[in-house]
Image (spheres, rainbow, N blue to C red):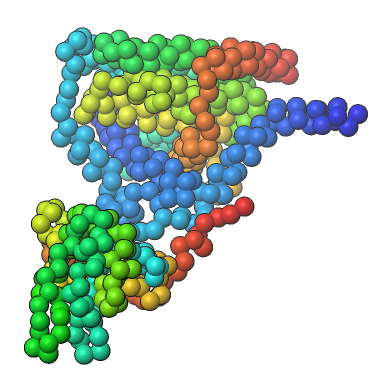
Amino acid sequence: MVEIFVVLVMLLKLAVLVAVLLMLPIPLTWLERKIAAHIQQRPGPMRVGWHGLLQPLADGIKLLSKEDHIPDAADRFLFTLAPIITLVATLTVFVAIPFGETITVYGTEITLYLTDMNVAVMYVLAIAGIDVFGVIIGGWASNSKYAVLGALRTCAQLISYEIPMGFAVVGVVMLAQSMSLVAIVEAQSELWNIVYQPLGFVVFFIAGLAEAQRIPFDLPEAEGDLGAGYHTEYSGMRFSFFMIGEYLVLILLAALNVVLFFGGWNPLFLPLPPLIWFLLKVAFFVWLFMWFRFTFPRYRYDQLMTIGWKVLLPLSLANILISGVILS
Amino acid sequence: MAMAGKQISRWIGWVFFSDIINGLSLTLSYMFSKTVTEHYPDNEKWVPFERYRGHHFLNTDENGEVKCVGCELCAKICPCDCMEVVPYEDENGNRRPLVFNIDMARCLFCGLCEDACPADAIKLGQHYEFSSENSEALVVGRDALIASPRKAEQGGKVVKAKLTTSNGAPISEQTEDEGYDWWRNIRRS
């Protein structure tokens, strides 16, 4: 009986998580357009609903009603598969993210995370790496020059930046003596990791921007030179799968930055509930990513590679060395 | 030594991302500054200056009689041949226009008719929202010209307005006389 209850709670948590995550891109597109607009002294979407709040819904209806076009020369099976891989891979990562501590509902303790894996850090980095396959397969299956070039660039970029990203996390793991994200957050209850690992944070943040393919590292979708990059040939709902996937990676990176360096659900000044603190921090990082997007121009391809291999990789290795020396 | 100091401070700034922070603070200040967009046609509308050349109108004298004497000078000077004037003799023996058609679809709003007019009758006014889905509706007759809006008395401002329709076409209707100079929103450094 108890086991069934546990499974039910688990399924319920999963359903809520997936529902929330799939709905989140709706306000986020609105927020992104508003931030873009206000940085450029425009009001942004204003006409659909109060201050354009319903604009994403209108866009969604438009995307749903568009023709679902598959090019003749495309590989139909892979073309259909690619957006699903991206979306599923990104959603799967959230299983390991701790959103808060336990809450008590009707006398039962419910944890605000799905699993407390002992190798959560490895899991997150590995599964997040899978969404590269969606991008490559999508670009290759489209059978279009722009899409293939975009996919190749994405491939090179994501693989290069996964290395400094992984190394940047090593410092945090050394501090917490554990790879479990819950343990990492609990280890930060006194002082956040940003104080011990400023260099690690900088490397992780920049590599994260590149992993999320956000400006200034949005070469995979450089509109000017590639059409739209790997999703050039996609339309309708398939395109919106990629879009949703992109926003989920954004949320994921914000969440990872918070969990690894900004103390997860640990409060700063106000004694708000842990979940609220976590969401506030994630919201701040999402805002920060959007703010970056409309401030900086795009890097050139060789600059991208230089930053990845000649700057971030040595820095992340140095970070491990320094952390090791100080800890021992 | 001073040069070396400069170099060192530049390196320190580079290490702590000083130029990136400069850029971010600039965009942040813009993010929370006032937007400059004119909310046309929903909430605001531009009232053009007096010199603006918009939709034509025919002036009337104090008795409400049209000033035009039907001399057809405007039709002759019109570079795109968009005017048609047919004069007649009214009950007082004055020469007046029987037909006064302007094809707005062909007019280029040069204002030569205004210059040519000896009776100060035809003018180009402030009205600029007269788009239409068929070009025949753009041929405007005498009575419509007499009724159309005059030149703006105090132009060059953004006033409150609301979106309505007139004859099936959407227009922005001015609701208040008071307005502000749009250029005050523009930030100059």
Rendered location of residue B116, percent (x, y):
30, 68
**Can residue A187 be seen in the rendering of this structure?**
no
The residue drawn where x is 46% and y is 11% is A156
**In-front residue for pair A242/A152:** A152
Q: Going by the picture, which residue comes out furthest to the right?
A: B1
The residue drawn where x is 31% and y is 40% is A26
**In-front residue for pair B67/A49:** B67
> In the displayed structure, does residue B168 sit left or right of residue A257?
left
Q: Is residue A87 above or below residue B62?
A: above
Rendered location of residue B46, percent (x, y):
36, 64
**Can residue B103 be seen in the rendering of this structure?**
yes
The residue drawn where x is 31% and y is 63% is B112
**In-front residue for pair B106/B48:** B106
The residue drawn where x is 37% and y is 40% is A28
Number of numbered discs: 0
| Image-quadrant location for residue A247 | top left
Q: Is residue B89 above or below residue A276?
A: below
> In the displayed structure, does residue A26 sit left or right of residue A220?
left
Rendered location of residue A15, percent (x, y):
26, 32
